[in-house]
Image (cartoon, rainbow, N blue to C red):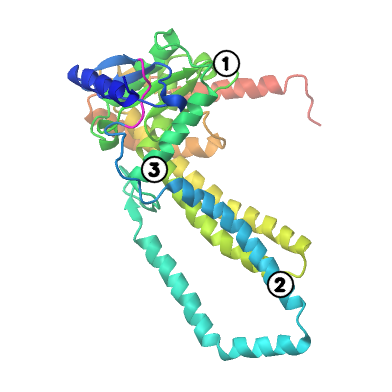
Amino acid sequence: MYPILILATRISRFRAQGYKVFLQFRQHRTFVRSRYVLNQNSNKLLLNHSPKLKPGCYFHTTPKRYNPIISTIVRQVFKVVSIIAGRTLRKWYQNLSNEKKKSLSSWLFLNRSKLIFVLVFAMLGLTVYYYTHIQETPITKRKRFIAFSPDQFELLNTLELESQLKTYQNKLLPSNHSSTQRVARVARKLLESNKDIDHIKNHEWSVSVINDEETMNAFVLPSGNIFVFSGLLKICENDDQLATVLSHEMSHAILCHGMELLSHAHMVDLFFIGIIGFLWMLLPTDSIASIGTAISRFLMRITLDNPYSKLLETEADECFWDKMTKVDKDNGPEFTKIDFLTTHPSHEKRCENLDSLLEGALKCRSEHGCGPLPKQDPRERVKNQQFVKKAKDKEGIVVL
């Protein structure tokens, strides 16, 4: 039987059973690795012998008009082209005689209005392009630039999932493993407590546990694929701590931060292409132009990339804080033991931000009928642990 007929048969069978189907092709049209799918309709865990991809129709009779991968490749190519073009113009100008240089300067001066018009027209075009791609962030309602359509981003998600599965294909724990069951249980509780969020209702979520006890991390792909390293499970004393990390990572997926970061990189690259072209055209030598390129890249990273990344991390913290307050109505005290945030550095600033949101979180808890909190503030316990750790680190050291 042809592979497409096999696939159609499986889709029909699973849909008849009330499940939404996730299927994924690998090379040579073979199916790979079974995975958990959190089925929210039947409230069951589906052990699917074919891992999932994009829900819905996966076959297209006509090609997509614009592939986002081409955009990424073209931007990298244009960086090289910009350098070569700038360097070529500089070399050409340096080889001109003084008379021709004066003649060129006169021509530029006489046609300055036309050149300014072209520059303004280009800037106006970029401005229109930017503002016609402004969208609203789910939940927080923040305005942001999105360069890609949902279908284009779905294609990128597919490739990312393929890459992750290929990277960890020999390390994924079985679906019936206790660690996978634990992550699935916590993830399901988070999803069921936040069904009012459209991204959670309209997407399927899956769980995979990577057998790597040296890595204490977790990440969630924008398509809803949750990956957790066993090293993180090892240091999580209870499910509440695991839920803290998962909530933060799931917030990135719910807020579509992956698409936003790609769009941000898209605009930054367009800006950078123009900068390096001018640098290689105006700076006198290749070595100075190379240094100027490195400095400009560094400045753009600390002024554009890093602040933007911190903005998204803070937004994810705020979103996860709201989600955590709605979890476990019958066992309210359990989800208050937030001992750490291990996903990213600068924990002090993130803790300060979360403390500022505490009053609103307690109000949200009350509105959703959660149980009473324990009398002891868990933050005090964390401070005591940190104090003991610092004292232990300084043991045997005399400060003069």
Q: Which mark is residue 153?
A: 3
- Horizontal side of residue 273 vs 203, given as left or right: right
Residue 202 horizontal/vertical position (percent):
25, 33
Please tell me in which quadrant of the rendered image residue 197 appears. top left
Residue 15 horizontal/vertical position (percent):
21, 22
Q: Nearer the viewer, residue 237 or 10?
A: 10
Q: Residues within 10 Å of mark 3 (few under 14, many from 20)?
A: many
Please give the name of the residue rendered at 56% of the width and 37% of the height, measured from the top-left corner.
Answer: 346
**Disc 2 marks which residue?**
90
**Disc 1 marks which residue?**
213
Residue 388 horizontal/vertical position (percent):
61, 20
| Amino acid type at mark 3 | Phe
* Number of the front mark, 1 or 3: 3
Mark 2 and mark 3 lie on one chain; the one further toward the N terminus is: 2
Mark 2 and mark 1 lie on one chain; the one further toward the N terminus is: 2
Mark 1 and mark 3 lie on one chain; the one further toward the N terminus is: 3
- Under circle 1, the secondary element is loop
* Residue range corresponding to the magenta coloring: 49-54
| Amino acid type at mark 2 | Arg
- Horizontal side of residue 332 vs 261, given as left or right: left
Figure quadrant of the C terminus: top right
